[in-house]
Amino acid sequence: MAAKLSVIFYIVLCLEVGIVLTLLPWYSPFGLSDWGDNFFLLYAAQKTGLQGLQHAVASGWIRGAVTGLGLLNLGIAAWEITHFRQTVSALEGAPSKPPSPPSPSNNAAQPAKADYLPDYERRNDAG
């Protein structure tokens, strides 16, 4: 039960972070100031002496990078939703069932089996 709740909370966290990072650089909801006109950003720029920091963060390149991180979080959430049972079983310690290999048909060619010997133990086929 704890594993299921952990995965559900992780999915919710990824969704929330993804939505915020995707939308916040482009919109100013709830009366928040613009992305590049932020009090904390202005304060950090003044304290560090980097006056160009505010212009760099306000640029479209940084906004796009932050949006990309948001989309990555949304992708992780979608992957976790589709592989929910596999993640829960991995957290519980139960081995997940690997897909079974296809059964050989009548006289189908079988791939050669590797001998898994290190290079120094391989026999010399040339001589």
Image (cartoon, rainbow, N blue to C red):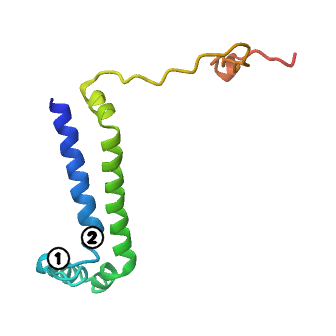
Q: In which quarter of the image is residue 35?
A: bottom left
**Circle 2 residue:** 23
Question: In the rendered image of this protein, does residue 55 appear above or below residue 72?
Answer: below
Residue displayed at 47% across by 25% down: 99
Residue nearest the viewer, comparing 29 with 54: 29
Is residue 116 placed above or below 23 in the rendered structure?
above
**Dot 2 amino acid type:** Leu
* Residue 24 located left or right of residue 86: left
Asked if 23 appears above or below 87 in the picture, the reply is below
Q: For this rendering, which residue is in front, 60 or 71?
A: 71
Query: Closer to the N terminus: mark 2 or mark 1?
Result: 2
Which residue sits at x=14%, y=79%? 32
| Residue at figure coordinates x 71%, y 19% from the top left | 112
Q: Assign a secondary structure to mark 1.
A: helix
Mark 1 highlights which residue?
29
At 66% across and 19% down in the image, what residue appears? 114
Q: Is residue 106 left or right of residue 30?
A: right
Q: Quadrant of the N terminus?
A: top left
Instruction: Name which residue type carries label 1.
Output: Pro
